[in-house]
Amino acid sequence: MYDKVETIPEKVLKYCPRCGSGLFRYQKDYSFLCNECGFHFYINSAAAVAAVIVNDKGEMLLSKRAFDPHKGMLDLPGGFVDPQESAENALKREIKEELNLDVNHYQYLISAPNEYVFSGFSVYTNDMGFLCHIKDFSTITHRDDISDYFFVKPADIDYEKICSDSIKSIIKTYISLSCKQE
């Protein structure tokens, strides 16, 4: 496991991706500037989606992470938005890839920032949570980067086992909104 301080961009990125110069310096505004060729590179948030899926019993679907980061911890199904892909299409694609389910309807809930350490590098994400409606659960199976899934009553969720603060925030927002509607 990596120490997060070692994974932040200013500790990892040493050379200009355009010219290879070692004169690539962090600018304290989430950017780097190459003093050799003038290339200016900003560290922007990567878009990611997370699905709140609830069955007819009011239980929430939680997935178990198959790989690091946070292997074995609980998560919401979802993943990164690919380049030139909308968040909505990424949501439907990820749920199909991970659970073999079709999203029939979705509703945006909330976004939350996250730091996702992958391959020794901090990727800052904006995790967008959506409430997803699934008509047919008969094809559900775990695959891709999910090792298992569970349906859990919202009151029984152990937040210590949830993989990130952003996912905790999305879950808590859904629970708060669903309680107001009752």
Image (cartoon, rainbow, N blue to C red):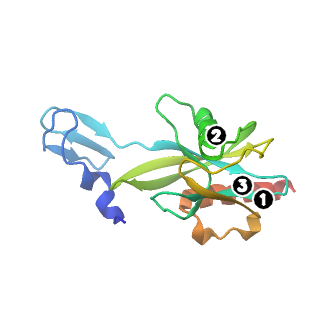
Point out residue 110 in the picture as x, y percentages from the top left corner.
63, 48
Mark 2 residue type: Lys
**C-alpha gap between disc 1 and disc 2:** 20 Å
Residue position marked by numbered label 1 in the rendering? 59
Q: Dot 3 lies on which element?
A: helix
Considering only vertical position in the picture, is 6 above or below 25? Answer: below
Q: Which quadrant of the rendered structure holds the C terminus? A: bottom right
Q: Position of residue 78 (x, y in %)?
A: 59, 47
Q: Which residue is mark 2?
A: 96
What SS does tag 2 mark? Answer: helix
User: Toward the viewer: 40 or 106?
Assistant: 106
Q: Position of residue 89 (x, y in %)?
A: 61, 32
Q: Is residue 88 left or right of residue 177?
A: left
Q: Residues within 10 Å of mark 2 (few under 14, many from 20)?
A: some
Q: Nearer the viewer, mark 1 or mark 3?
A: 1
Above or below — where is 174 with respect to 162?
above
**CA separation, marks 3 and 2?**
22 Å
Disc 3 marks which residue? 174
**N-term mark: 3 or 2:** 2
Point 45% across, 59% down: residue:
69
Sequence-first disc among 1 and 3: 1
